[in-house]
Amino acid sequence: MNPWNRACCVGLFLTTLSLVCIVANAFLLVPDGKTWSSDQLSLHVLLMPGFIGGGLMVRSLQQRPVTRGVGTTIRGSGSHLAHRVQIPRSCWCSVFGMLGAIYCLSVSGVGLRIGPKCSINGEWDYHFQETAGAYLKNDTSWNLCEEPLKVVPWNVTLFFLLVVASCLEIVLCALHLVVEPIHAPGEIQKTEDILGNFQRR
């Protein structure tokens, strides 16, 4: 598989993962399938790790390639020859996407460890924060949350999905740096040959 095809495959996987992150974050905003006020949602949900990090920042890799004009003046004729060369996704965009995936991973990981914000006996708080993540192994305690109903398995499932997706995004963004060609060698060589032939005349 040539570098262009490999880059397209990596880009396709990144697009799919970014959409997964966006959808997962959307569901995190409506635990139990209902809308809640911002003070009833976890801070880690409101930080939008799936929308901002794993979603939009990674999606920036899927923008169209930048074009660059390569040209010279033909001696004796006064005319101008310009050949536009497609330049693929630059390295900084891959790094930008990787930073977004790392942001998504960090916030989602902390959200998993602390647990959701919920109401127990009418008190809204992070009731599982002191367990330092041990609540994940004790699913009998998940029913303690009265509102939103089933918020613990809801958050655990979606945050775990974001953690997995963002880990894959980090790997793919790193791979994108390797397989993404900096330029199209054939097109550059073709341009140089044309310009060289005109200049020798």
Image (spheres, rainbow, N blue to C red):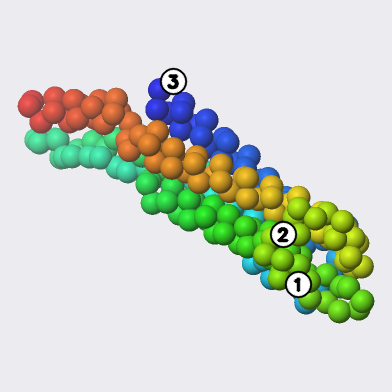
The residues bearing labels 3 and 1 have C-alpha atoms spaced at a distance of 50 Å
The three-letter amino acid code for the residue at tag 3 is Met
Q: Which mark is residue 194?
A: none
Label 3 secondary element:
loop
Judge whether residue 42 can be spotted in this image. Answer: no
**Residue at 76 percent of width and 53 percent of height:** 137
Q: Residues within 10 Å of mark 3 (few under 14, many from 20)?
A: few
| Precedes in sequence: disc 1 or disc 2 | 1
**Residue at 76 percent of width and 72 percent of height:** 126
Image spot of residue 69 (x, y percent):
29, 42
Label 2 secondary element:
helix
**Residue at 78 percent of width and 71 percent of height:** 127
Tell whether 27 sits left or right of 160: right
| Precedes in sequence: disc 3 or disc 1 | 3
Q: Nearer the viewer, mark 3 or mark 1?
A: 1
The three-letter amino acid code for the residue at tag 2 is Ala
The residues bearing labels 2 and 3 have C-alpha atoms spaced at a distance of 46 Å
The three-letter amino acid code for the residue at tag 1 is Tyr
Label 1 secondary element:
loop
Q: Residues within 10 Å of mark 1 (few under 14, many from 20)?
A: some
Name the residue beneath numbered marker 2.
Answer: 134
Query: Residue 8 versus residue 168: which sits nearer the camera?
Result: 168
Query: Residue 79 versus residue 73: which sits nearer the camera?
Result: 73
Judge whether residue 44 can be spotted in this image. Answer: yes
Image spot of residue 23 (x, y percent):
72, 50
Tell whether 199 sits left or right of 135: left
| Image marks 2 and 3: residues in contact by CB distance under 8 Å | no
Name the residue beneath numbered marker 1.
Answer: 126
Image spot of residue 65 (x, y percent):
43, 42
Q: Which mark is residue 1?
A: 3
The residues bearing labels 1 and 2 have C-alpha atoms spaced at a distance of 14 Å
**Residue at 69 percent of width and 50 percent of height:** 160
